[in-house]
Image (spheres, rainbow, N blue to C red):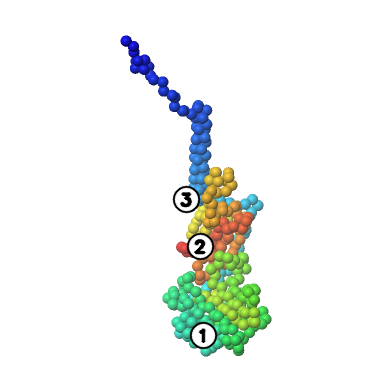
């Protein structure tokens, strides 16, 4: 009798071997995987470390490391005092008394509707009069705007053909609406005509118009010298006040580095991770991404910067070498940033 060898104990039928990666290939996969994990871990740790150091919690305790002075940059000296201009709310007598409009733009003054008045030389519109009457101190209120009539509409309307005549008319208008007769006025070309605006004089500091909330009147003349527009605010400049407690540049920088939000405001910045810094460009960048600002290269004290209406607000402005805004700190010791106004 014969025995089937395939059924014999200890034997097995021949099976073709399955494909298995070679030892070299397995080693290569291990190396690639390990390197990827190391880069990923390093990137996460690096990003978390850099991001953590720019948080308010870190800055409040240790200081934001991005808020540093560039090489060769010195902090400027602070003046012992600074001039602060005060303002008071006004509705120019409207709606019951139109004598201010008559004195400024000529009478008779006729009410067209609840917010519009016709004068001898043009139309005055005060679209936010209701809210001004309800809350004269609200920074959301807007003032009256005068729109002058054309020479065809009012042939007898006066014209001011020289710069001196225009400046004299601007000062007359400002005096009528309650501004000081010596209020500082700046003239400049506007279209085919000329415009004038009021800026408060702060001899101890520079003046900025970029971030200002100062309600500066603006008066414009057409090319023929006729008064084309006057834009006012429901505020009148009343008096300057001397501010003696001025925050030093050193203190302002310290407030900025420690993210003291009551007096300081800083730019949000992206924090590139390790791979992004090696590559040199953030992944998935968009137009909304803010480029990280560099070290502080410029510190300037401005006399009219930011805050709420009712007075001018001096502040320190910090810029990098490219002119990018790094941060702003109020310069008056008793000033604080109101919520929502930065």
- Residue ID for mark 2: 342
| Residue at figure coordinates x 39%, y 20% from the top left | 13
Establish if 81 lies above or below 63. below
Furthest toward the top, the residue is 1
Query: Which of these two is toward me, 341 or 48?
Result: 48
> Which image quarter is the N terminus in?
top left
Figure disc tally: 3
The numbered disc on residue 118 is 1
Q: Nearer the viewer, residue 193 or 132?
A: 193
**Mark 1 and mark 2 in contact (Cβ < 8 Å)?**
no
Placement of 123 over or under 33, stated as above or below = below
Residue found 51% across the figure and 85% down from its top: 118
Of residues 260 and 127, the one nearer the viewer is 127
* Point 34% across, 11% down: residue: 2
Q: Where is residue 247 shown, x and y percent of the image? A: 55, 60
Q: Secondary structure at mark 3?
A: helix
Instruction: Say which of marks 2 and 1 sits in front.
Output: 1
Residue 119 shows in this picture: yes
- Read off the residue under disc 3: 57
Which class describes the residues within 10 Å of circle 2: few (<14), some (14-19), or many (20+)? some
């Amino acid at each position: 009798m014969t025995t089937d060898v395939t059924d014999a104990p200890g034997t097995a039928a021949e099976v073709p071997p399955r494909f298995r990666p070679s030892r070299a290939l397995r080693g290569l996969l291990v190396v690639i995987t390990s390197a990827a994990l190391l880069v990923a871990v390093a990137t996460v740790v690096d990003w978390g470390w850099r991001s953590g150091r720019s948080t308010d919690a870190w800055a409040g305790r240790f200081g934001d490391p991005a808020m540093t002075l560039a090489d060769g940059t010195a902090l400027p000296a602070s003046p012992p005092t600074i001039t602060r201009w005060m303002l008071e709310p006004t509705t120019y007598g409207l709606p019951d008394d139109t004598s201010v409009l008559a004195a400024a733009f000529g009478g008779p003054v006729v009410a067209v509707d609840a917010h519009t008045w016709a004068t001898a030389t043009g139309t005055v519109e005060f679209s936010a009069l209701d809210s001004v009457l309800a809350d004269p101190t609200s920074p959301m209120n807007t003032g009256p705007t005068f729109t002058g009539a054309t020479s065809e509409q009012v042939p007898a309307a006066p014209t001011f053909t020289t710069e001196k005549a225009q400046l004299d008319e601007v000062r007359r208008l400002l005096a009528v609406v309650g501004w000081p007769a010596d209020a500082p006025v700046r003239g400049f070309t506007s279209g085919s005509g000329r415009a004038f605006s009021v800026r408060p004089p702060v001899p101890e500091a520079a003046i900025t118009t970029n971030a200002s909330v100062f309600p500066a009147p603006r008066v414009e003349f057409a090319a023929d010298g006729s008064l084309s527009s006057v834009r006012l605010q429901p505020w009148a400049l009343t008096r300057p006040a001397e501010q003696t407690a001025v925050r030093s540049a050193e203190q302002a920088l310290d407030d900025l580095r420690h993210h003291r939000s009551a007096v300081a405001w800083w730019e949000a910045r992206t924090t590139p991770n390790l791979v992004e810094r090696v590559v040199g460009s953030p992944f998935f960048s968009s137009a909304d991404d803010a480029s990280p600002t560099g070290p502080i290269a410029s510190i300037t004290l401005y006399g009219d910067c930011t805050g709420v209406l009712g007075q001018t607000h001096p502040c320190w402005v910090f810029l990098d070498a490219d002119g990018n805004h790094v941060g702003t700190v109020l310069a008056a010791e008793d000033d604080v940033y109101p919520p929502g106004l930065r």
